[in-house]
Amino acid sequence: MKHFFALLALSAPLLGAAQTVPQQAAAAARPQASASPLRYQPMAPVGASALVQEVQDWKAANAAVGQYPRGHRDIVKWEKAQPPAPAAAKPPPEAPR
């Protein structure tokens, strides 16, 4: 128990230093405070244009799945028929310093 109180007494200055300085917080709340500019992010399509996009995505996905009428078996066969990917070039070793 006495170790607890000793630890508490030793950690009090550290906890006090973790508190924010009121002047800095007040400066950030001012409307004139500097801030980074806002970036424009366009919204996702809504309404009829979103519906057209969903239909096109669905049709493309359905056509892609239709290429493999036997499912996974055809995909594995297609993967085996593809040439192996070229090995990535290894960077030259660094010169000793």
Image (cartoon, rainbow, N blue to C red):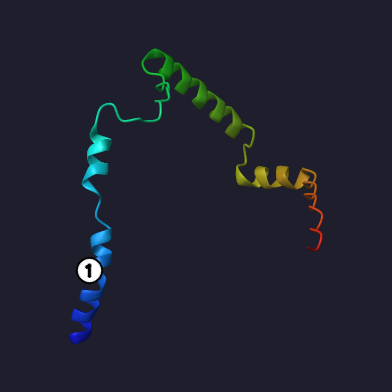
The residue under the point 39% across, 13% down is: 48
Q: Is residue 44 above or below residue 71?
A: above
Q: Is residue 72 above or below residue 50?
A: below
Q: Is residue 33 left or right of residue 84?
A: left
Image quarter of residue 67: top right
For mark 1, does the 10 Å Cα neighbourhood hold few (<14), some (14 to 19), or many (20 or more) residues? Answer: few
Q: Amino acid at mark 1?
A: Ala
Which residue position is annotated with label 1?
A: 12
Q: x%, y% of residue 88? A: 77, 49
Q: Is residue 6 above or below residue 22?
A: below
- Comparing 43 with 78, the one in front is 43
Q: Is residue 66 above or below residue 43?
A: below
Quarter of the picture holding the C terminus: bottom right
- Comparing 85 with 56, the one in front is 85
Check disc 1 and report its element: helix, strand or loop.
helix
Q: Is residue 66 left or right of residue 9?
A: right
Image quarter of residue 19: bottom left
Q: x%, y% of residue 76? A: 68, 47
- Comparing 43 with 26, the one in front is 26
The residue under the point 24% across, 34% down is: 29
Q: How many marks?
A: 1
The residue under the point 22% across, 84% down is: 3
Image quarter of residue 26: top left
Q: x%, y% of residue 83? A: 80, 44
Residue located farthest toward the top when viewing the structure as drawn: 48
Residue located farthest toward the front when viewing the structure as drawn: 23
The residue under the point 24% across, 31% down is: 30
Quarter of the picture holding the N terminus: bottom left
